[in-house]
Amino acid sequence: MKKIAVIVLASAFAFGFTGCGKKAAESAAGGKSLNVMIEVEVESLDPQVATDGTSFEVIADFTDGLKQMRADGSVTDALCAGETVSADGLTYTFKIRSDANWSNGEPVTADDFVFGWQRAADPKTASEYAYMLSDIGQVKNAAAVEAGKMSVDQLGVKAVDSKTLEVQLEVPVSYFDQILYFPTFYPVNKAFFEKCGDSYATSAETTLSNGAFVLTEYQPAAVSFKLVKNEKYYDASRVKLAGLNYQVIKDSQQALLSYKNGDFDTILLAGDQVDQVKDDPEYKSVGAGYLWYIVPMMQKIPELANRNLRMAMTYALDRETIVRDVLKDGSIASFASVPNEFA
């Protein structure tokens, strides 16, 4: 089984998402903090190491890449201030915003992107999503670097100057801009990373932000943690929330009761609960920000190598009935490998 994650927004919460009708907690600064329920603990806050959707969502709260996705699915600039593409489609040159800074006051530079991408491709990092650079992004030499056949400094990415990043591809990739909001492509400040060492991204003190929020409370496997608005963020004037308060609630019934008591502004519901509240004006179905693909295990089940058998199985699957009568959670029947909302 291969995991393919798609980050829907750099931070859906940042720009005015106010939950489901409950009153958000007032912050000391006079703004509002959103109380958010998540089902599982964050596995990692390291953008090149994280593998799960919850981690990706939280990382995106405090980190921007070159691009970000709008609510309608289109891609727009984040840290990118402009780009040019060569006539053959093999060289991308990105200008980085002059007002983009890390939460420690250091500017975000092209070298930060080079270091982040090299970390992802480096076999020593063992990034499960390194293939985003090679198989998906077709960054020059990425496959060879990941295989240990080339050094990381031969990866097709370089800093032309402090605010200019050049990327070379093996072949033209029409969707290249659309994958640059994925955490594998996020920048990492090398000096900060080396100072933190093995403790990097394991606490608020060892995590650096260039995004809408700053982590203030966190420890590995934490069941609750907080972020506050990043006043140094280049787009801070558009961030409507004072902060985000996350809490892990694994029992959906407990989560619903907590929501009704005003403890949460947004929660996740199980299918039977959706059936109960779907007519409530506060209910809203939101597509997940990541996908799971199941690859047929032909080595263990040789019959699945038969294309006609696989086609017969997919034709026999009543997707509409499954989502309507079994899942009952707002899921949408999908008839292709790429759902409509991500196409």
Image (spheres, rainbow, N blue to C red):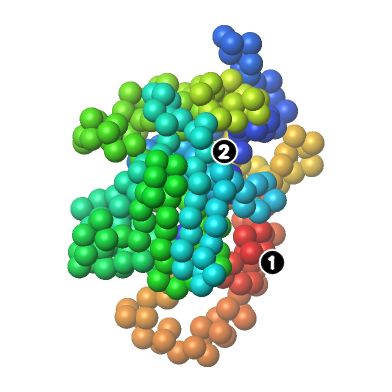
The dot on residue 99 is none
Q: Earlier in the sequence, mark 1 or mark 2?
A: 2
Check disc 2 and report its element: helix, strand or loop. loop
**Vertically, is 307 above or below 32?**
below
Residue shown at the point (41%, 86%) measured from the top left: 305
Residue shown at the point (65%, 47%) measured from the top left: 70
Q: Amino acid at mark 2?
A: Ser
Figure quadrant of residue 187: top left
**Left or right: 19 with respect to 211?**
right
- In the image, 282 versus 65, the foreground residue is 65
- In the image, 109 versus 321, the foreground residue is 109
| Image x and y of residue 330, in percent | 67, 52
Badge 1 vs badge 2, beta-carbon distance below 8 Å? no
Residue shown at the point (25%, 51%) measured from the top left: 125
What residue is pinned by disc 2? Answer: 11
What residue is pinned by disc 1? Answer: 320
Residue at the front extreme of this rendering: 161
**Left or right: 13 with respect to 62?**
right
Check disc 1 and report its element: helix, strand or loop. helix
Figure quadrant of residue 284: top right
